[in-house]
Image (cartoon, grey):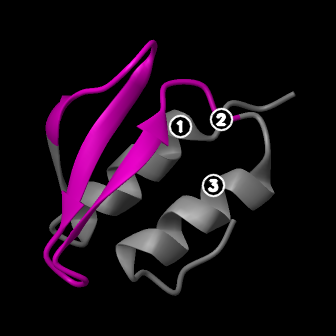
């Protein structure tokens, strides 16, 4: 199975999102200037549906 996390993080950075802090376990808290909200990104994302959900929370329409 593919790990979508590295590609997802690159897309988030392209849209101006940035890492804020570490959360519980292997999760990271990111901030989106598009939605002015924080959201969680897991360090290992195996599902494209989960990756698309993170993009949606960040306000990015691009999909995997």
Q: Earlier in the sequence, mark 1 or mark 3?
A: 1
Gap in angstroms between the C-alphas marked 2 and 1: 5 Å
* Mark toward the start of the polypeptide (3 vs 2): 2
Q: Which residues are magenta?
A: 20-45
Q: Residue at x 15, y 68 (%)?
A: 16
Q: Are marks 1 and 3 in contact (CB under 8 Å)?
A: yes
- Tell me, yes or no, whether the two marked residues, 3 and 2, touch with CB atoms within 8 Å: yes
The total number of labels drawn is 3
Q: Check the image and name the residue furthest to the front.
A: 24
Secondary structure of the residue carrying tag 1 is helix
Place of residue 8 in the rendered image (x, y in percent of width and height, measured from the top left): 48, 50
Q: Do callouts 2 and 1 mark residues in contact (Cβ within 8 Å)?
A: yes
Q: What residue occupies the far right of the structure in this picture? A: 1
Residue drawn at (25%, 83%), measured in percent from left and top? 35
What is the spatial separation of the Cα atoms under label 3 and label 2, in whole angstroms? 7 Å
Quarter of the figure with residue 1: top right
Question: Looking at the picture, does residue 2 appear above or below residue 22?
Answer: below
Q: Quadrant of residue 4?
A: top right
Per the rendering, the mark at residue 37 is none
Q: Residue at x 25, y 49 (%)?
A: 30
Q: CA distance from mark 1 to mark 3?
A: 7 Å
Q: Which mark is residue 45?
A: 2
């Amino acid at each position: 199975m593919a790990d979508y996390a590295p590609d997802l993080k690159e897309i988030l950075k392209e849209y101006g999102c940035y890492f804020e802090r570490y959360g519980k376990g292997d999760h990271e808290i990111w901030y989106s200037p598009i939605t002015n909200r924080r959201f969680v990104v897991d360090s290992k994302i195996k599902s494209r549906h989960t990756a698309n959900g993170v993009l949606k929370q960040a306000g990015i329409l691009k999909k995997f």
